[in-house]
């Protein structure tokens, strides 16, 4: 069995996918690289086949009709044979030294007596034109060099989130938890992280800057203009997260620290959706923002009141033009989460 399966969702990625693949090849035979060509119209499919032919024991090329990022990730999970599973987007890459440490740690954990469900590492915002790179670290929240549970976690503060870039899940857990990302929808990476969390019993944190998250392309999903155009997809993801778990249910989610973190995660998603609606300056989108908060109120009134009357929630729901100006102050926090370009 491979130690690590790495899925690379690709759509019209010919300009940058080689850099991503090349950064992953040093993992050698311990790694399985699954390139998912999601109905690309450029040379992506040929490049995927080229690597699969050159590295038959390491690289798989899978071609499918266009289903969007989420369906490409679903395909990666279905075809994964590794003990652990990681998604690396085709315009991103990994750091070599950190990669070696990740694989060494997985080898050690695989030989241990305790099953580790989630491995977390740091990621770096590789923002175009910015010399000083921001790093998302978890040293203030997670114990290091040991297996730990949610009860051992110090509270993750606002702005400190576990994103797809920082997480490696146990493959079997992803299959058993019923994770299925919606097709033709952007921003599903949030569901990829969020849905499996209650199934995670044991975690491990490596304080290494493994994942390099590129930000700078105008057509990128986190470009603010693009996000405004895809507000409905952002709202869809937000509603799916609301539907996923009743966060006020202590019996279903007995870990207080896990509930706290999941509320924070849902809160920042509500903030991002609200900010994008506000930034659009369109009456129709502002109405969609109000409807989203009403939806949360209907599904989980207790969490609704907690989030709405928290600091961020209040800023998202202040009335009138002056209120919306104050709301934009929360934009900086949303920027930290999304990394707008």
Image: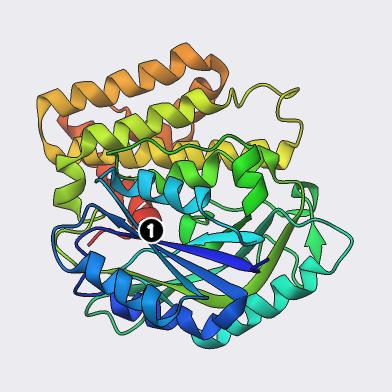
**Residue in the foreground of this view, choosing between 12 and 237:** 12
**Residue in the foreground of this view, choosing between 133 and 215:** 215
Residue 121 in view, yes or no: yes
**Residue in the foreground of this view, choosing between 41 and 246:** 41
Point out residue 329 in the picture as x, y percentages from the top left corner: 30, 48
Q: Residue at x 60, y 58 (%)?
A: 81
Horizontal relation, residue 1 to residue 330: left or right:
right
Q: Can you say which quadrant of the picture contains the C terminus?
A: bottom left
Q: Residue at x 37, y 50 (%)?
A: 72
Q: Is residue 330 above or below residue 146?
A: above
Horizontal relation, residue 176 to residue 209: left or right:
right
User: Where is residue 129, by image quadrant?
Assistant: bottom left
Q: Is residue 107 above or below residue 222?
A: below
Horizontal relation, residue 249 to residue 94: left or right:
right
* Residue matched to label 1: 336
Colour logic: rainbow
**Residue in the foreground of this view, choosing between 101 and 130:** 101
Q: Can you say which quadrant of the picture contains the N terminus?
A: bottom right
Q: Residue at x 35, y 55 (%)?
A: 338
Name the outermost residue toward the right. 113
Horizontal relation, residue 337 to residue 118: left or right:
left
- For label 1, the crowd category at 10 Å Cα-Cα, with few meaning under 14, some 14 to 19 and many 20 or more, is some
Q: Secondary structure at mark 1?
A: helix
Q: Is residue 106 above or below residue 328?
A: below
Q: Is residue 165 above or below residue 72?
A: below
Point out residue 319 in the picture as x, y percentages from the top left corner: 25, 24
Point out residue 21 in the picture as x, y percentages from the top left corner: 38, 76
Q: Residue at x 31, y 70 (%)?
A: 48
User: Where is residue 251, by image quadrant?
Assistant: top right
Residue 216 in view, yes or no: no
Point out residue 280 in the picture as x, y percentages from the top left corner: 13, 39
Number of numbered discs visible in the structure rendering: 1
């Amino acid at each position: 069995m491979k130690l690590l399966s790495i899925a690379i969702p690709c759509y019209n990625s010919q300009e940058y996918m080689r850099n991503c693949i090349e950064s992953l090849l040093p993992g050698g035979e311990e790694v399985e690289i699954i390139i998912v060509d999601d109905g690309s119209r450029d040379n992506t499919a040929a490049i995927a086949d080229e690597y699969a032919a050159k590295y038959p024991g390491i690289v798989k090329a899978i071609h499918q009709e266009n289903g969007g990022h989420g369906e490409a990730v679903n395909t990666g999970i279905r075809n994964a044979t590794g003990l652990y599973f990681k998604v690396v987007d085709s315009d991103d890459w990994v750091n070599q030294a950190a990669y070696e440490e990740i694989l060494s740690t997985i080898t050690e954990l695989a030989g241990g007596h305790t099953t580790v469900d989630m491995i977390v590492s740091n990621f770096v915002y590789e923002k175009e034109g910015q010399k000083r790179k921001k790093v998302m670290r978890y040293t203030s929240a997670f114990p290091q060099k040991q297996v730990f549970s949610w009860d051992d976690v110090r509270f993750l503060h606002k702005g400190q989130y576990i994103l797809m870039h920082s997480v490696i899940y146990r493959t079997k857990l992803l299959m058993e938890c019923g994770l299925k990302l919606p097709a033709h929808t952007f921003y599903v990476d949030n569901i990829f992280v969020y849905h499996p969390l209650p199934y995670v019993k044991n975690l491990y944190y490596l304080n290494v800057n493994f994942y390099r998250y590129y930000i700078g392309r105008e057509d990128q999903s986190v470009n603010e203009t693009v996000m405004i155009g895809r507000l409905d997809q952002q709202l869809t993801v937000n509603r799916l997260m609301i539907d996923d778990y009743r966060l006020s249910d202590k019996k279903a989610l007995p870990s207080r620290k896990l509930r706290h973190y999941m509320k924070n995660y849902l809160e920042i998603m509500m903030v991002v959706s609200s900010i994008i609606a506000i930034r659009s300056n369109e009456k129709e989108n502002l109405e969609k923002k109000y409807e989203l908060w009403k939806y949360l109120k209907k599904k989980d009134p207790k969490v609704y009141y907690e989030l709405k009357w928290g600091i961020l929630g209040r800023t998202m729901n202040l009335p009138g033009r002056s209120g919306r100006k104050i709301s934009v102050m929360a934009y900086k926090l949303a920027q930290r989460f999304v990394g707008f370009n």
